[in-house]
Image (cartoon, rainbow, N blue to C red):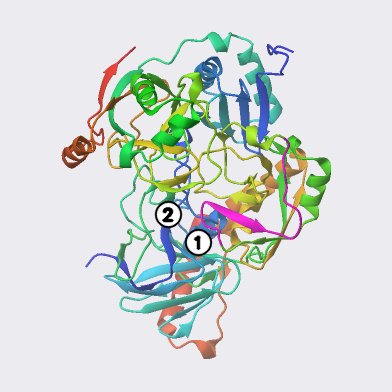
Amino acid sequence: MSRALHIHRAGPGMSVQDQGRPGWLDQGLSQGGAADPLALAEGAALLGQNPGCAAIEMAGSGGIFEATGADLRIALSGAPMQASIEGEPVAWNASHMLHTGQRLSIGGARRGNYGYLHLGGGVATPPLLGSRSSHLAAGLGRLLAAGDEVPVGEDAGGTGTGMTLDVADRFSGGTVRIVPSVQTDRFARKDLERFEATAFQRDPRSNRMGIRLAFQGAPFAARDQLNVLSEVIVPGDIQVTGAGLPFVLLGECQTTGGYPRIATVVPADMPTVAQAAVGATVRFSFVSREQALAQHRVAMAALRALPTALRPLVRDPRDMRDLLSYQLIDGVISGREEQE
Amino acid sequence: MLRPRTDSGLPMIRDVGLTGLLVSFADRLGEPANRAALAFRAAVDAEGWDGVQETATSLTSVFLRFDPLMLDHDALRARLDALLAQADWRAASLPRGRRLWRIPAVLGGTCGPQFAEAAKAAGLDVDQALKQVAGARVRVLSIGFAPGQPYMGELPEAWDIPRMQALNPQVPEGALVVAIRQLIIFARPAPTGWRHIGQTAFRCFRPEAAQPFALRAGDEVTFRPITPDELDEIAARDTSGDGGAVAEVLT
């Protein structure tokens, strides 16, 4: 039997995602990919594998999964969700072993929106246009559903299991850094100041294409806003609709748009925007290009350093029913030494 | 300043967030600016600058996505300025390998429920409007919004009609829509503020095919009027996605 993950129950927004399809902007196809790219990288680090591996993205809630055909190494990252293997709670931001026939249950997100289930060897569905990501807006792939058998690639073993990462909370909103964009100067200074002073909440009518921001106060209007020629738009752009409502565009956005853009979120803060759940407050703060670049440099270095930030998951021996799986931690440590 | 500037400050280079630059040749649609964008993008691609990750054109601009840690904003701007100064981009020739597509389309009727309304907005009677759309030879000005989706223009002046205030809740794949002197064939079912005037069986995006994106900026397109029955017949036997269209190479 081939290595696979059987889905017994699937939450409403579950799909295969990797780093998406960069490079097709000229053909009208946006990059798409994991809504929280940092969570994708964290899962790859936890399993000691290539960050290009595809994982299962779970929007809002998870599902019930079973390893079939082989024992599977798994890792959990992104929005923290309740998770258990055969009824035994397991840690989030950590890697675990899911033995053949064992069931993994993942519940609703406690904070944030997008949780990720990573598999040792990665999801092995056939790539399309260079990626395994479902891009629903473009009609590529589909949502996962109960009854699906998700193929899993060969696993080189990476860092074993029983590893964890300390992850800063990016699942509760906060202040997000922005830089000026193409039409920022079409907004009045007082409106830009009001934009920075406003507390925004994610509107439930948000999806992988964009986050609609709810707020108290007058709409934001750009000068001459009906005469904006349709122009290239990119993830992170904050478009203001004709009704004066801001939307932050995410990876699955369209590639051109005719609404004025008040600002663009810096890449390092996109996970915070994507993970701000309904009710969490997001504020925006303009930074200079120099500041944004300095922060971008730090964020990129941290991303590269993820594999060295792992530490063994400390378990209370009283909670350990299965000493055999605990032995795998030895393998984990030697795995790290090989990397250094 | 090397850049040839007009009174309006065009061409203009602007930041798009931290990782993008936009070179705009006009702030409203015009054939020379579209020509400039296509030619300038080809020139940028030919330079092959390290750190430039992707380029694309919109109707009148060229977009560059780059790695700002590898290629400094100011350095990239300076290179773009220098390249802008090298030619009169608005007089550049069109890209090579362009094709003329003849695409069968049902115009009006239930397949184009807003044809009469669009004709009225253009100040034409339905017969005149049919003649103009069927007689038009439009060019693919840009591909965007959805995969492979063409913005085609320009139609005669009369068709400078605005988008609608209220959206069409959904037009199907292959729908032919019109606004602001342009036609679009929808690549995906989508809501739109453009008026739905016809239907084709042409698939702009064919993810499984060797050539997933059928049209290219610079291609020219005419529409051959057919009946709804003919459209059904074409759709039933078409496996290529061309929807009965024929293409001939122009250059």
Task: Using the image as rendered, state which of residue A119 and residue A125 is in the foreground.
Answer: A125
Residue A172 within the magenta-colored segment of the rendering? no
Q: Earlier in the sequence, mark 2 or mark 1?
A: 1
**Which secondary structure, mark 1?**
helix
What x and y, as percent, mark residue B125?
Answer: 41, 26
**Which secondary structure, mark 2?**
loop
Q: In the image, which disc is placed on residue B137?
A: none
- Same chain for the residues under marks 2 and 1 in the image: yes
Q: Chain of mark 2?
A: A
Task: Indicate the quadrant where residue A217 lies.
Answer: bottom right
The residue located at (61%, 15%) in the rendering is B83
Kind of residue sitting beneath label 1:
Gly
What x and y, as percent, mark residue B163?
Answer: 53, 37
Depicted B100 relative to depicted A144: above or below: above
Tell me which segment is drawn in magenta. A205-223
Circle 1 residues within 10 Å: few <14, some 14–19, many ≥20: many
Q: In the image, which disc is placed on residue A53?
A: 2
